[in-house]
Image (cartoon, helix red, strand yellow):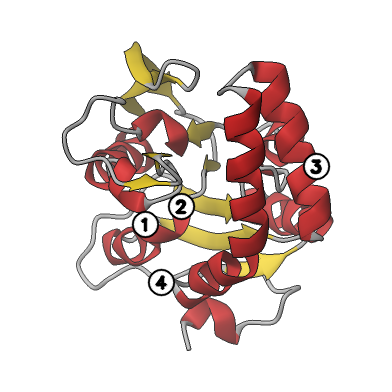
Amino acid sequence: MTEAADRTDSEPALFPLPDGARVPARRVVLLTGASGSGKTSLTRRLGLPVVELDDFYHDGDHPDLPHRFGIVDWDDPASWDGAAALVALDRLCRDGRAEVPVYDISTSRRTGSTQLDVTGAPLLVAEGIFAAQLVDACRAEGILADAICLRRPRVVTAWYRLLRDLGEMRKPPLTLLRRGWGLLRAEPALVRRWVALGCRPMGPAEAERTIRALAR
């Protein structure tokens, strides 16, 4: 059982720094959840600096991309550059600035980069379906404030995911329906895996209260 999981759902989780670590100016909340679970809506309400971990996807022609359902499996962590994401989060927490990629989901390609400046912010949020992959590393670096997995009824999540993906024209409609059905069936196992990696499951309202308390 992880330290995060040992806490009650209403108690903010602040992880201790490793001995001898340089104290970061701010820490990061890792926010994961199924695609369509409300991560982006939550971060918009919070008004805190946000790192979109989806921007660290590999390009669609990367030679080692995993495949599923006859297409690239963008829900597999192997489709994503976790090492680069960790470097960016560490620099933001300690120095307040970092260069991060800009990724176009519709074309599955990085289109450039941008300089993030979070100086003056007490906390930042890193959101994405792969956030749980960074829990242990962020804790080891002394920059982890909390790790949260958003959870709500999976039919609701699937509906909002489909509306979003159709509206953004992310992929052809038939591909979205096939992928969405697979994600609907896989969601309980995904949540269990994220919790096993150190995330605390909670609904959007509780997550918002928790993160606001940490920011204070």
Q: Which residue is mark 1?
A: 134
Q: Residues within 10 Å of mark 2 (few under 14, many from 20)?
A: many
* Eye-nearest disc, 4 or 2: 2
Closer to the N terminus: mark 3 or mark 4?
A: 4
Which labelled disc corresponds to residue 159?
A: 3
Which labelled disc corresponds to residue 131?
A: 2
Identify the element where label 3 is drawn: helix
Q: Which residue is mark 4?
A: 16
Q: What's the residue type where badge 4 is placed?
A: Pro
Q: What's the residue type where badge 2 is placed?
A: Ala
The quarter of the displayed image where residue 146 is located: bottom right
Q: Hey, which residue is sitting farthest top in the picture?
A: 111
Q: What's the residue type where badge 1 is placed?
A: Leu
Query: Residue 41, percent across and down?
Result: 74, 35
Q: Nearer the viewer, residue 202 or 54?
A: 54
146 horizontally vs 215: left or right? left
**Do labels 4 and 1 touch, CB within 8 Å?**
no
Identify the element where label 1 is drawn: helix
Q: Residues within 10 Å of mark 4 (few under 14, many from 20)?
A: few
Q: Is residue 148 above or below residue 169?
A: below
